[in-house]
């Protein structure tokens, strides 16, 4: 990711309302609309899940210039999801819902450059997750899409 | 060099049978769909809507403005193709899907060029910080990223990052020819980067080394300047500095 991409990611997140989980609720609402079969995979209460997602987003944004830490965390995340049985194809609706969250929340302030930055970041993030999953041995446990 | 459908299809089959694509069923379908459309005579136009319906099972009322699944997956597919060519130098043809469009380009790759690209493979592990301060390792990571980014601009070089190297370990075939290692020392605001380029196939002999200096005052500018200096020196050392220039080692 170059410095422009990082700037657009940060600017878009800075435009989200502070201490308000409504955008994350919108993200999950859209995700379950696009992938209804994902809904039963979430085992914890959705308020808790939304908080975890918001924390993860904040952590990622604060570590964009620390690729070592970022890649390590994403690979761990990918390995855990692989263990849960999540398949590569199941990442796609999550990226779509993420884009929707910014579109709905920011309206015209979500510029094409910001969208392009999120598409690039999501491609990078899911690729690192895949690497993590490839490097780990699958355990074949039940499927979940929790963003832990 | 002209390309025919059989060459492209053979290359596509090879790519889709690789471990990187084998487990990515939808992205494999995506790639096959756009390649098939482009190979039609005359080539079919490829719209976001067509891919959504044909590959992602969207219905006729699909609206790309509210469901950007094709754009999301196109970005991921481009990344997957990049990774594939990083570990498998193309022979005969290379498939590119330029940003902002879905029509693939089939770029002829001469056998000689493929061999040369393979010959100029370089493994770049993360640069090491010699201090205990975790911020210094962050600086090293950023500098590694910047150097890899600049080196990757030269298509004659095949730059392999640490993660790709881990994948290569499990794959038969030629190993990277060069290893680029660097360590970073810091004293106050002064930074010193020691760089070594080694030829792995030549018993690990050092081909080039140098020391670079900078400051921590403006981290991004320093990283970019150092990366540009390193890129220039490596290009000169490998005789690939001029566009179309030949390597003589």
Image (cartoon, coloured by chain):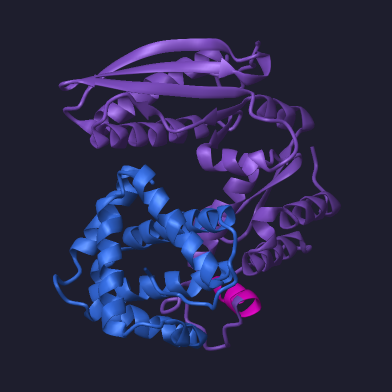
> What quarter of the picture does the C terminus of chain A occupy?
bottom left
- The answer to whether residue A104 is left or right of residue B190 is right
Q: Residue furthest right?
A: B6
- Give the chain coloured purple: B
Residue A120 can be seen, yes or no: no
A25 w.r.t. A134: above or below = below
Secondary structure mostly taken by the magenta-highlighted segment of the chain: helix
Position above or below: B53 against B13: below
- Residue A58 at what x, y percent from top left? 24, 61
On the image, the x and y values in percent for residue B53 come to: 61, 80
The answer to whether any part of residue A35 appears in the image is: yes
Q: Quadrant of residue B103?
A: bottom right
Q: Is residue B46 magenta?
A: no
Compared across the picture, whether B17 is left or right of B226 comes to right
Question: Which portion, as a residue range, is magenta?
Answer: B47-55
Residue drawn at x 19%, y 66% as measured from the top left: A15
- Residue at 38% from the left image edge and 43% from the top image edge: A68
Could you tell me how many numbered marks the image carries? Answer: 0
Residue in view at x 40 percent, y 75 percent: A97
Q: Is residue A125 above or below residue B148?
A: below
Closer to the camera, A148 or B93? A148
Asked whether residue B54 is drawn in magenta, I would say yes
Instruction: Locate residue B157: give its quadrant.
Output: top right
- The residue located at (54%, 11%) in the rendering is B206
Would residue B2 be found to the left or right of residue B64 on screen? Answer: right
Figure colour of chain A:
blue
Q: What x and y, as percent, mark residue B222? A: 26, 27
The quarter of the displayed image where residue B127 is located: top left
């Amino acid at each position: 990711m170059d410095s422009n991409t990082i700037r657009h990611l940060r600017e878009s997140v800075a435009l989200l309302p502070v201490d308000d989980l409504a955008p994350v609720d919108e993200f999950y609402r859209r995700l379950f609309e696009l992938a209804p079969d994902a809904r039963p995979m979430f085992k914890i209460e959705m308020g808790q899940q939304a908080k975890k997602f918001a924390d993860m987003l904040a952590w990622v944004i604060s570590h964009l210039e620390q690729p070592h830490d970022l890649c390590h965390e994403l690979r761990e995340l990918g390995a855990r999801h692989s263990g849960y049985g999540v398949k590569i194809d199941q990442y796609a609706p999550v990226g779509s819902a993420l884009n929707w969250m910014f579109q709905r929340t920011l309206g015209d302030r979500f510029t094409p450059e910001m969208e392009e930055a999120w598409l690039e970041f999501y491609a990078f993030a899911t690729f690192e997750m895949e690497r993590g999953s490839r490097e780990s041995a699958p355990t074949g446990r039940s499927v979940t899409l929790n963003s832990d | 060099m002209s390309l025919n459908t059989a060459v492209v299809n053979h290359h596509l089959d090879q790519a889709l049978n690789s471990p990187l694509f084998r487990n990515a069923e939808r992205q494999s379908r995506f790639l096959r769909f756009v390649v098939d459309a482009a190979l039609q005579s005359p080539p079919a136009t490829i719209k976001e809507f067509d891919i959504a319906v044909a590959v992602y099972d969207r219905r006729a009322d699909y609206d790309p403005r509210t469901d950007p699944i094709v754009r999301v997956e196109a970005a991921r597919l481009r990344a997957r193709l990049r990774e594939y060519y990083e570990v498998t130098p193309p022979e005969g043809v290379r498939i590119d899907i330029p940003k902002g469009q879905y029509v693939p380009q089939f770029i002829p790759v001469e056998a000689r060029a493929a061999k040369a690209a393979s010959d100029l493979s370089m493994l770049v592990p993360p640069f090491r910080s010699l201090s205990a301060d975790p911020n210094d390792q962050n600086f090293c990571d950023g500098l590694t990223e910047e150097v890899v980014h600049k080196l990757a601009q030269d298509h004659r070089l095949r730059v392999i990052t640490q993660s790709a190297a881990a994948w290569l370990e499990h794959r038969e075939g030629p190993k990277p020819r060069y290893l680029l290692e660097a360590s970073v020392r810091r004293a106050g605001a002064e930074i010193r980067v020691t760089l070594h380029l080694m030829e792995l196939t030549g018993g690990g002999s050092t081909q080039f080394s140098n020391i670079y200096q900078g400051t921590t005052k403006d981290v991004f500018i320093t990283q970019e300047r150092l990366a540009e200096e390193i890129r220039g020196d490596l290009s000169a050392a490998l005789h690939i500095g001029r566009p179309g220039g030949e390597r003589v080692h």
